[in-house]
């Protein structure tokens, strides 16, 4: 893997570490409530277990991406980048928030293109 591909993979992985933190630890805090546009503090409290589960999945995506860098394995990187891309597309579609596509899927697509080109 070249340095551009590695840098893009690190960016995507760090995004998912950030999502993990938001969903697992900040969901019921003002930052989490504002970031996700939650209805109320009570709604955040009622859904915090679901959010923590989402955060855990984001952690697995980040771990897989970091693992692909350590092993310098383009196949592993491609798999996890593809997963992130699909999650970003589906998340954007299901929530009707196009910014999810730009924040989550576009960096993964760029990393995927870089990984497959070089």
Image (cartoon, helix red, strand yellow):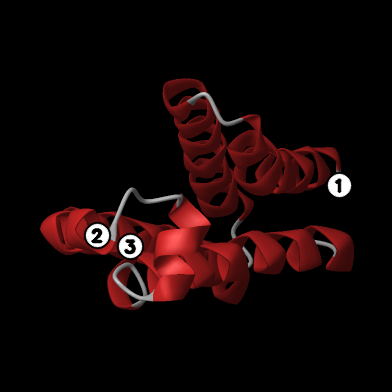
Query: Seen in the image, is 2 located left or right of residue 65?
Result: right
Q: Residue 103: x and y, percent?
A: 67, 47
Nearest to viewer (mark 3 / mark 1): 3
Query: Seen in the image, is 40 located left or right of residue 99?
Result: left
Q: Residue 113: x and y, percent?
A: 79, 38
Q: Earlier in the sequence, mark 1 or mark 2?
A: 2
Does the rendering let one see residue 89? yes
What residue do we see at 37% from left, 51% from top? 38
Q: Earlier in the sequence, mark 2 or mark 3?
A: 2
What residue do we see at 42% from left, 73% from top? 30
**Considering only vertical position in the picture, is 60 above or below 96?**
below
Q: Please tell me which residue lies in front, 41 or 3.
A: 41
Q: Residue 58: x and y, percent?
A: 39, 59
Q: Earlier in the sequence, mark 3 or mark 1?
A: 3
Crowding at mark 1 (Cα within 10 Å: few <14, some 14-19, many 20+):
few
The residue pinned by badge 3 equals: 55
The residue pinned by badge 1 equals: 118
The residue pinned by badge 2 equals: 44
Q: Please tell me which residue lies in front, 101 or 5.
A: 101
Q: Secondary structure at mark 1?
A: loop
């Amino acid at each position: 893997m070249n340095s551009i591909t590695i840098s893009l993979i690190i960016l995507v992985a760090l995004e998912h570490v950030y999502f993990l933190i938001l969903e697992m630890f900040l969901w019921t805090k003002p930052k989490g409530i504002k970031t996700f546009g939650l209805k109320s503090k009570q709604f955040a409290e009622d859904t915090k277990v679901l959010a923590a589960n989402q955060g855990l999945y984001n952690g697995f995506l980040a771990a897989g991406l970091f693992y692909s860098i350590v092993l310098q394995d383009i196949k592993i990187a491609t798999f996890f980048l593809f997963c992130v891309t699909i999650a970003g597309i589906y998340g954007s579609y299901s929530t009707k928030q196009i910014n999810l596509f730009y924040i989550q899927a576009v960096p993964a697509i760029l990393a995927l293109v870089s990984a497959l080109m070089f």
